[in-house]
C-alpha cells in the first residue's frame, strides 16, 4: 500500500495513473512499479495490463478492480480481437487534448486509439506532436510535462477548434460512442456495426480510397490511410480525414446520388498501380456475415457501372480477377502442389498473408506455413507461378476446429482470449500449430460468440489450458530436459550454485544453447537429475523421513560418517540417502 494515494481521473489510462502515483510518492520515475510488479517497461508504455497486474495496482492504490480493468488497453484487445486492436492502437507515440491536461497532466485511455482524433468535451483536435518543434510525443515525456527535444511545456499547447455542426465532428461522435457500446439493430447500416466491425469495414475501404481526393473537409487532400511516412497512418489529421471519408461513403449507401456509387465510379476511373489487387482485398470483406447486405449493393453498383463503361475506355482495373504479372518464384518456404488447370477463378483462392488476415493473425504468412507443412492446409502453385490456398480447403480447416458458439463470453467462467492465451502460455510452447493440434485431438475446446473465421477473436476455458500447460512442460522435459529454472526450484538454490555444481561435475548439461548476445541456455537430462535428487536429501528432509534429530545428523557430518555433497559449493548440507541408510543399519 502506497503512503500517498489519489483518485484515478475519469477516463484516465492505467499507465498515466502510475506516473501520477510515482510523482505523488516522490519517486524519481516509475521504476519502482516496474520492479514491484515485475512488468516490462514496454507494457506500461503501451498501457497493457493483465488481471494480475491490475490486482497489484488495486492493492497499492485502493482503486476497485472493476474500475482499473476498464482503463487498460487489454480491455480493448479482449473486446475487439487482436487483429483489429493492432490496427488501431497507437504504437510508440501519444496524443492529448490541451484543455484536458491544463489542470492536471494525465493521459486518457481512449486517446490510445488512432481513429479517436477529437476531444468531444472541448470540441478540439487532439495534439499529436510538439507545437514548437514538431517532435513526436511519448507518454513519459507527456507526463514530465515538456518536450524532450526543445523543452516546450505541453500545457501551453493550443488545440484547434472543431465546429460541432460539421460532418467530421458528427463522425467522431458516432465513432467514439461505439467504443464499449452495445450494438442496437436498426435500418442504419453503420449503426448496426460494432466498433470492431466498423474498423474492419474501414480497413478494407481504405484499399479503394487510397490515392483518391477527400470527399469531405479538405477536398484537395490526397487520402493516404496506409502511409508509411513519418508517423504515417497514426497522424491525427490523416486519421481524422480518412475515417470521415469512410463514414461519408456509407452514409448514403443506395439511391441515385449514393456516395458509395460515386466512390466506386471514381475508383474505376483511377489508374493507380495495382488497383485490381485492391478490388480483391476489398471483396474479402464480404466473407464476414455482417457485410452480406453490403455485398448485394456492391454487386448491383458494379453491374450498373460496367454498362456505363465507354467503348473507348481501356481501363481494366475494375475486373476483380485481374492480377499483376510477376516473375516465377524460385523458392517457397512451405510445401505445395502444382495445379495443372490452365485457368482458375481468383475469387476462390487466397494468398497466405490473406489467409492469415482472415484467421485474425495479422498478415504473417509464417503462421500459415506451419499449418501447411503438417497438412492442415494445402498450398497450390498456379500455372502463373503464384501460391494460393483454396477457399474450400480453408473452410474445411475451420470446420475441423469444431468451434462451440455461445451467446456471450461470460458463459465461460474462466474464459481467456486466444491472444491472451498465446501471451500467457507461449513460453511453454503454446503456439498456433500446437493450439490446432490440441483442438483437433479434443484436449481443448475453442469457443466463439459469432460465426466468424477469425480465430484471434475466439477464446478458451483457462482450466483446460492449465492442463495443456502441464502436458507441454512434461513433453519439453522429456525432449530437452530440465531448464536451470526448474533445477533451481527442485533444489532450492540459485543459478550461481548450479554453475558450481556443474564445475564439480555433480550436474552435467545435456545441451547448451549459445545466443548472439552472450547468454546461454542449459538443459539437463531428466532421468539423471531425477535420480540424483532421489538419492540426496537435505537435513530437514532426512529428519522427517528417518525421524532423526538435527544434532545427530550434524554430528555424523562432522565425524565424516556422512558426506556433504555441497561442501565448497554453498552453506547448505546435501547428504546421500544410501549413507544414512547404511549408518542406521550399523547403529541399529
Image (cartoon, grey):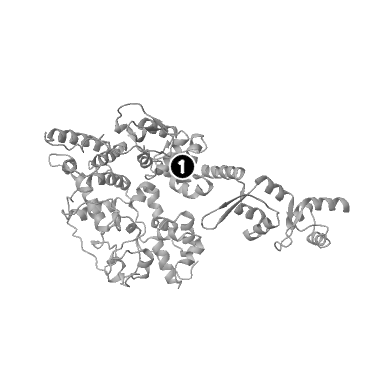
Instruction: In the displayed orientation, state which residue is furthest to the top.
Output: 341
Q: Position of residue 36 (x, y in %)?
A: 51, 63
State the residue in front, 352 or 13. Answer: 352
- Along the line of sight, the residue nearer the viewer: 253 or 564: 564
Q: Is residue 41 left or right of residue 99?
A: right
Residue 196 percent location from the top left of the image: 32, 46
Compared with 199, 141 (above or below) is below
Q: Position of residue 307 (x, y in %)?
A: 14, 32
Location of residue 360 (image quadrant): top left
Q: Is residue 6 visible?
A: no
Name the residue nearer the viewer: 565 or 459: 565
Point 39% across, 38% down: residue: 330
Q: Quick one: label 1, few (<14), some, or many (20+) residues within 10 Å?
A: some
In this image, 198 relative to 555: left or right? left
In this rendering, the answer to whether 416 lies above or below 41 is above
372 relative to 152, above or below: above
Picture quadrant where residue 239 is located: bottom left
Residue, disc 1: 432
What is the count of numbered marks?
1
Q: Secondary structure at mark 1?
A: helix
Where residue 566 appears, as percent x and y from the top left, is 72, 59
- Residue at 47 percent across and 40 percent down: it is 433
Q: Quadrant of residue 15?
A: bottom left
Amino acid at each position: 500500500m502506497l503512503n500517498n494515494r489519489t483518485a484515478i481521473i475519469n477516463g484516465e489510462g492505467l499507465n498515466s495513473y502510475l506516473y501520477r502515483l510515482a510523482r505523488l510518492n516522490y519517486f524519481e520515475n516509475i521504476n519502482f512499479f516496474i520492479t514491484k510488479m515485475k512488468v516490462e517497461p514496454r507494457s506500461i508504455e503501451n498501457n497493457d495490463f493483465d488481471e494480475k497486474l491490475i490486482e497489484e495496482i488495486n492493492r497499492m492504490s485502493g482503486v476497485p478492480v472493476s474500475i482499473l480493468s476498464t482503463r487498460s488497453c487489454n480491455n480493448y484487445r479482449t473486446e475487439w480481437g487482436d487483429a483489429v486492436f493492432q490496427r488501431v492502437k497507437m504504437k510508440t507515440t501519444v496524443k492529448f487534448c490541451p484543455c484536458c491536461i491544463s489542470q492536471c497532466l494525465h493521459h486518457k485511455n481512449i486517446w490510445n486509439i488512432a481513429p479517436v482524433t477529437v476531444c468531444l468535451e472541448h470540441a478540439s483536435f487532439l495534439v499529436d506532436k510538439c507545437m514548437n518543434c514538431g517532435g513526436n510525443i511519448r507518454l513519459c515525456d507527456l507526463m514530465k510535462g515538456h518536450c524532450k527535444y526543445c523543452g516546450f511545456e505541453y500545457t501551453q499547447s493550443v488545440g484547434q477548434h472543431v465546429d460541432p455542426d460539421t460532418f467530421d465532428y458528427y463522425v467522431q461522435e458516432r465513432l467514439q460512442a461505439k467504443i464499449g457500446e452495445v450494438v442496437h439493430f436498426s435500418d442504419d447500416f453503420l449503426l448496426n456495426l460494432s466498433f470492431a466491425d466498423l474498423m474492419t469495414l474501414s480497413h478494407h475501404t481504405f484499399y479503394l480510397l487510397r490515392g483518391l481526393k477527400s470527399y469531405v473537409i479538405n477536398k484537395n487532400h490526397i487520402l493516404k490511410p496506409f502511409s508509411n511516412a513519418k508517423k504515417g497512418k497514426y497522424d491525427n489529421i490523416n486519421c481524422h480525414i480518412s475515417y470521415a471519408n469512410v463514414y461519408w461513403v456509407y452514409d448514403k449507401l443506395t439511391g441515385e446520388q449514393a456516395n458509395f456509387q460515386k466512390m466506386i465510379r471514381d475508383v474505376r476511373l483511377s489508374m493507380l498501380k495495382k488497383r485490381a489487387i485492391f478490388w480483391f482485398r476489398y471483396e474479402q470483406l464480404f466473407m464476414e456475415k455482417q457485410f452480406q447486405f453490403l455485398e448485394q449493393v456492391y454487386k448491383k453498383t458494379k453491374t450498373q457501372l460496367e454498362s456505363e463503361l465507354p467503348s473507348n475506355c481501356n481501363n481494366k482495373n475494375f475486373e476483380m480477377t485481374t492480377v499483376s504479372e510477376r516473375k516465377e518464384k524460385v523458392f517457397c518456404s512451405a510445401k505445395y502442389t502444382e495445379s495443372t488447370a490452365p485457368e482458375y477463378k481468383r475469387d476462390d483462392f487466397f494468398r497466405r498473408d490473406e489467409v492469415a488476415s482472415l484467421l485474425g493473425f495479422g498478415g504473417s504468412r509464417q503462421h500459415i506455413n506451419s499449418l501447411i507443412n503438417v497438412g492442415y492446409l494445402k498450398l497450390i502453385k498456379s500455372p502463373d507461378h503464384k501460391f494460393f490456398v483454396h477457399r474450400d480447403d480453408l473452410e474445411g480447416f475451420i470446420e475441423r476446429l469444431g468451434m462451440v458458439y455461445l451467446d456471450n463470453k461470460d458463459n465461460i467462467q474462466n474464459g481467456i482470449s486466444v491472444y491472451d492465451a498465446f501471451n500467457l502460455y507461449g513460453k511453454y510452447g503454446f503456439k498456433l500449430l500446437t493450439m490446432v493440434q490440441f483442438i483437433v485431438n479434443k484436449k481443448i475446446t475453442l469457443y466463439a460468440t459469432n460465426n466468424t473465421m477469425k480465430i484471434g477473436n475466439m477464446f478458451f476455458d483457462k482450466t483446460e489450458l492449465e492442463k495443456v500447460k502441464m502436458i507441454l512442460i512434461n513433453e519439453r522435459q522429456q525432449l530437452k530436459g530440465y531448464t536451470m529454472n526448474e533445477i533451481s526450484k527442485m533444489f532450492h538454490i540459485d543459478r550461481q550454485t548450479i554453475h558450481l555444481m556443474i564445475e564439480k561435475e555433480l550436474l552435467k548439461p545435456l545441451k547448451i544453447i549459445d545466443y548472439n548476445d552472450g547468454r546461454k541456455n542449459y538443459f539437463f537430462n531428466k532421468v539423471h537429475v531425477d535420480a540424483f535428487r532421489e538419492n540426496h536429501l537435505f537435513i530437514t528432509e532426512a529428519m522427517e523421513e528417518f525421524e532423526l534429530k538435527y544434532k545427530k545428523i550434524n554430528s555424523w557430518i562432522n565425524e565424516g560418517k556422512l558426506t556433504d555433497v555441497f561442501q565448497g559449493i554453498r552453506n547448505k548440507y546435501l547428504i546421500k540417502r544410501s549413507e544414512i541408510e547404511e549408518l542406521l543399519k550399523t547403529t541399529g
